[in-house]
Image (cartoon, rainbow, N blue to C red):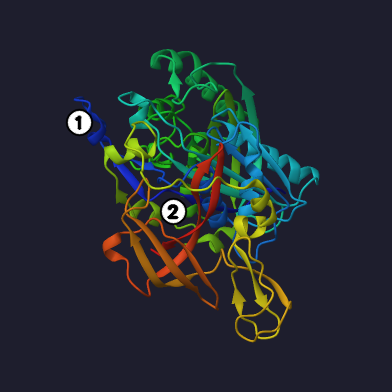
Amino acid sequence: MAGITSIGAYIPRYRLNLEEIAEFWGGKGSQGEKAVAGYDEDSITMAVAAARNCMSPGKEPVDGLYLATTTAPYREKQCAAIVAGAVDLKSNSLTSDFTNSLRAGSIAVKSALCAVESGAAKNILVVASDCRQGAPKGRLEQLLGDGAAAVTVGSENTIADIEDSYTIFSDFTDLWRTAEDAFVQSAEGRFIDAQGYMPTMQEAISGLMQQCSATAGDFAKIVFHASDLREHMSLTKKLGFEKGRVQDPLFARIGNTGAAASLIMLAAALEDAQPGDRILFAGYGDGCDAFVFRVTDGISGMRGRIGFKDMLAKTTPVDYGKYLLWRDCISVEASSLPQRTEPSLVSRWRERRSISALYGVRCLDCGTPQFHPIGQAIRVCATCQSKDNFEDYKFSDRKGKLFSYAIDQLQPTLNPPGLNGVVDFDGGGRLICELTDYDLDAVAIGMPVEMTFRKMYQGRGIVNYFWKAKPVV
């Protein structure tokens, strides 16, 4: 039987207080905060972080990756391939983008389940990630948050087996964004509820419950997508669900995370689930995908590994001005320093393993790991001086310590000052790189760090991704 074999999530550390947004515009805002992707984060980097959180050591390797997002940085380039490269999947892995719908996450999950049940694949990694933007001063600006979640779907060592599913489509226009739009647009709220969201969700969830002869009381947890808390509470009441069984949609903690929202809620539900629990899970957007999962004994192996509660608790406030700058909503004075060179497609292809998954080499004579500067191949071991006798060695999953660092007050960055450091990896190897997600007052020699996949800069329309070090928290 196919099911979920692992689950992970990623919530950015930065939080923007909703009342601060309203006060800036002279209005009244909602209580709570929303998660904000950092200046060097987007739907791709968050997808990589969620996928790495999901892929546990010892699990059977995945043979495919499905990426679900409505905020892909490219219109004509497969973004799933970028994520697959960063998490170091084999080149013969199936990759596919699911996009243009808030239901992309649940559609990808259903497609993965079908692939596994048919024997077309053994293990599929499904990642949903979104970084949507509401127009300044608008309702959606306060509502939309950023985040990602990932599940692996397989047939062995499952943590939640699929019991049944039910899908409908609906060509209803409630939220949309064209290729020319920077911000999400929305129809009138009452029209959405009365003619779109409510009837669609009621039909799909009621149809599923009737199909599997279940009642509301048969489910330990009920997870479903909604655009806001009012809509979520209304559907809970209409379907007769007991409030204590319905998973918190987390609107006041992280906001509405779009295509990732339902999977993020599922990650929160599974973190506290017990063997034998039945979970109703539904994603919405141009229709609805509804599922019934039964939690297995394998859930005990996930205890404490997702770390979802820690992601919600460990936060850093960001002010509204910095948020507008990060989202390119305001123009500021350009740096007078020389511009960085444009990304070279040739060099990026030649060094793709070093750039995508942070591969270096390890000497086969003395065992010393070494990371060479991009574009400069290592032929002689720095320790034993043996020549041309190396094997590939991946640094991206290694932790390390900060050996030295320099604060750059002149670096043209969206989050000044810049911080560059020298990282000594556990087990050997050294890398000079940028740091991110740091509290400058807490940076110190010997500080534990780990690697994270981030945006460096953009040129010629090409997003330049690479690895940075961040403090271990």
At a point 65% along the width and 53% down the height, the residue shown is 347
Left or right relative to 20: residue 248: right
Looking at the rendered image, the quarter that the C terminus falls into is bottom left
User: In the rendered view, would you say 164 is above or below 86?
Assistant: above
Kindly tell me whether residue 12 is visible in this rendering.
yes
Q: Which mark is residue 23?
A: 1
Residue type at mark 1: give it.
Answer: Glu
Label tally:
2
Q: Nearer the viewer, residue 430 or 412?
A: 412
SS class of the residue under badge 1?
Answer: helix
Q: Earlier in the sequence, mark 2 or mark 1?
A: 1
Give the x, y percent position of residue 171.
Answer: 59, 16
Q: Nearer the viewer, residue 70 or 272?
A: 70
Task: Name the residue beneath numbered marker 2.
Answer: 308
At a point 51% along the width and 55% down the height, the residue shown is 274
Outermost residue, right side: 119
Looking at the image, is mark 2 or mark 1 nearer the viewer?
1
Left or right relative to 123: residue 213: left
